């Protein structure tokens, strides 16, 4: 988006990833429900709520960049649309909850990566961004760990020699 600094662009991107994460966790929640994975449903619901909280905090912070909020949110919507495309490509009607958690592993790794980039850019000069990163990055690390663990647990329940 024209007129944004690198930092503002990255803020837009993490905002868009938080929007996309809400759609992705909702989708995988439906797959987990269909597969009767009730213990994973609670984790997905929490992840979904934290993504929503992240979007709200990002949007509030975008409002503090004078006259840039609209453009930052435009960047966010563009990132969100790319995430939706990726999910549509990756998950189809044959997908089960393991496929869902594998997709979330990529998505959460993307969030960890982007928040780490924002952290590297926000050193010292932007205390409000630093504060948001300090809140968000540990949550994204936890999300990544949880979806990887869920993938591995689901895979362990599958018979490797059974026809897929
Ligand atoms: Fe996340």
Image (tube, rainbow, N blue to C red):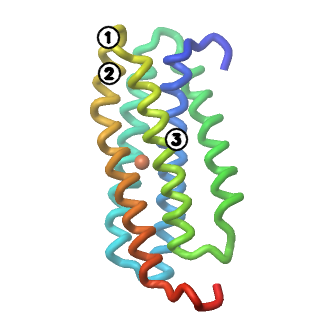
Report whether 7 appears left or right of 3: left
Q: Earlier in the sequence, mark 2 or mark 1?
A: 1
Q: Is residue 122 above or below residue 82?
A: above
Q: x, y (%) of residue 38?
A: 36, 78
Q: Quadrant of the C terminus?
A: bottom right
Q: x, y (%) of residue 3?
A: 63, 10
Q: Which of the labelled discs sits on residue 67, or is there none? A: none
Q: Disc 2 designates what residue?
A: 130
Residue at position x 52%, y 10% from top?
67
Name the quadrant containing residue 77.
Answer: top right
Nearest the camera: 139 or 31?
Answer: 139
Q: Quadrant of the N terminus?
A: top right
Q: CA distance from mark 2 to mark 1?
A: 8 Å
Q: Earlier in the sequence, mark 1 or mark 3?
A: 3
Name the quadrant containing residue 94.
Answer: bottom right
Asked if the residues shown at circle 2 and circle 3 are in contact, with their CB atoms under 8 angstroms apart, the answer is no
- Seen as rendered, the residue at the extreme front is 161
Q: Is residue 113 above or below residue 141?
A: above
Asked if the residues shown at circle 2 and circle 1 are in contact, with their CB atoms under 8 angstroms apart, the answer is yes
Report whether 97 appears left or right of 57: right
- Is the residue marked 3 within 8 Å of ligand 1, measured from its CB? yes
Q: Disc 1 designates what residue?
A: 124
Q: Is residue 48 above or below residue 125?
A: below
Q: CA distance from mark 2 to mark 3?
A: 18 Å
Q: Is residue 67 above or below residue 102?
A: above
Residue at position x 46%, y 49% from top?
108
Q: Which of the labelled discs sits on residue 17, or is there none? A: 3
């Amino acid at each position: 988006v024209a007129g944004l600094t690198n930092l503002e662009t990255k803020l837009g991107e993490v905002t868009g990833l938080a929007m996309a994460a809400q759609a992705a966790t909702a989708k995988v929640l439906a797959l987990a429900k269909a597969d009767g994975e009730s213990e994973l449903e609670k984790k997905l619901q929490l992840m979904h709520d934290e993504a929503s909280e992240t979007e709200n905090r990002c949007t509030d912070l975008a409002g503090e960049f004078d006259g840039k909020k609209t453009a930052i949110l435009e960047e966010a919507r563009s990132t969100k649309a790319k995430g939706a495309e990726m999910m549509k490509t990756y998950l189809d009607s044959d997908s089960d909850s393991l496929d869902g958690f594998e997709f979330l592993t990529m998505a959460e790794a993307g969030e960890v990566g982007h928040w780490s980039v924002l952290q590297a850019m926000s050193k010292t000069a932007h205390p409000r961004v630093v504060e948001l990163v300090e809140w968000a990055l540990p949550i994204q690390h936890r999300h990544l760990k949880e979806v990887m663990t869920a993938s591995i647990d689901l895979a362990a329940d599958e018979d490797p020699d059974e026809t897929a």
